Image (cartoon, rainbow, N blue to C red):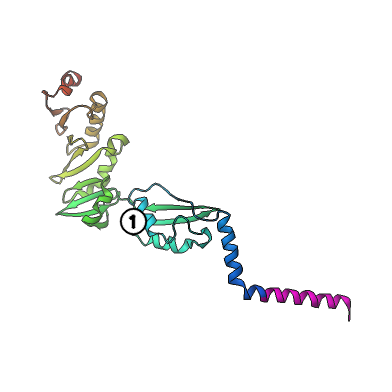
Amino acid sequence: MNIKKTFRIIVSTIIILMILAIIKYYDLIKSSFYTQLYEMGFKIENIYINQLSIFTVEEIVDKLTFAHGDHILAVDLQENKHILEESFWVKKANLSIEFPDKINIVIHEIIPEFIWRNQGQYFALDHLGEIIKKVDLTELNRFSNLIILEGDNARSFVQNLLSFIKIDDKIYQYISYVEWIGDRRWNIRLTNDLLIKLPQVNPLSAWNNFLSLHKRIDFFHNKVESIDLRVKDKLFIEFDLNNPINKNLLSTVN
């Protein structure tokens, strides 16, 4: 018999026997391999989740099918992506493994612009004033950082409202409540209870006047109750002069 042919037969036989052995002892080999990797540090030690606006980190972690200490190779990324995206307020979820011990989770949330309160019900609105979803009282606390909007026809004027209240990002963060009054003008309340009454005509100009005045007075450190800007070229401020904080307020305004 040809030596080369004999050699090929022997090699082929060895390969076949190895394949049969692997098939027979596959589970054992796999288990041993997994165990060795786990002992080498291929286990979940860190789960990174990006900053969230609506959900808490704990809520996201509770939805996952894996946890700290699990074998990192046992994580089904597609399954967990599907689970996370089943939540209404999750627009998209991306999961990736960073070997040997880290899972990265990036969640893109659907974040409303306002919570519209109408006839005892709450609705999440987008930047166009369109209703995203009715918000139940049980999930209302998710949106405690959003501005509450009131007024029967307020949704129709959301774009107009956003065109000026976002001029100053810092002040915008302190707006807690906006009301559409008489289907013609806005009242804006800040988190320190300061009420700002804007005119029907050119609220942008009035808002800019308020911002300029704020730079001089700093309404967050003075006990001012309301600022009325409804009359053109006039300003009405309501505050308690007996409060020592307001002692020099009149001279500042003048």
Which residue is pictured at 56% across the width and 56% down the height? 39
| Location of residue 144 in the rendering, given as x and y in whole percent from the top left corner | 25, 47
Secondary element at tag 1 = loop
User: Height in image: 147 above or below 76?
Assistant: above
Does the segment drawn in magenta span residue 10?
yes
Horizontal side, residue 81 vs residue 186: left or right? right
| Residue in front for this viewpoint, 157 or 55 | 55
Q: Residue furthest bottom?
A: 1
Horizontal side, residue 162 vs residue 249: left or right? right
Q: Which amino acid, by three-letter code, is at mark 1? A: Trp
| Location of residue 94 in the rendering, given as x and y in whole percent from the top left corner | 46, 56
| Location of residue 76 in the rendering, given as x and y in whole percent from the top left corner | 48, 63
Whether residue 168 is visible, yes or no, is no
How many neighbours does mark 1 have within 10 angstroms: few (below 14), some (14-19), or many (20 or more)? some
User: Height in image: 115 above or below 12?
Assistant: above
Which residue is pictured at 73% across the width and 73% down the height? 15
Q: Look at mark 1 in the image and give the residue it sits on.
A: 89
| Residue in front for this viewpoint, 140 or 204 | 140
Q: Which residues are magenta?
A: 1-20
Q: Main secondary structure of the magenta part?
A: helix
Does the segment drawn in magenta span residue 82?
no
Instruction: Locate the C terminus and report the quarter of the image it occupies.
Output: top left
Horizontal side, residue 17 vs residue 128: left or right? right
Which residue is pictured at 47% across the width and 63% down the height? 78
Please state the total of marks drawn on the protein image: 1
User: Height in image: 180 above or below 87?
Assistant: above
Q: Residue furthest right?
A: 2
Instruction: Locate the N terminus and report the quarter of the image it occupies.
Output: bottom right
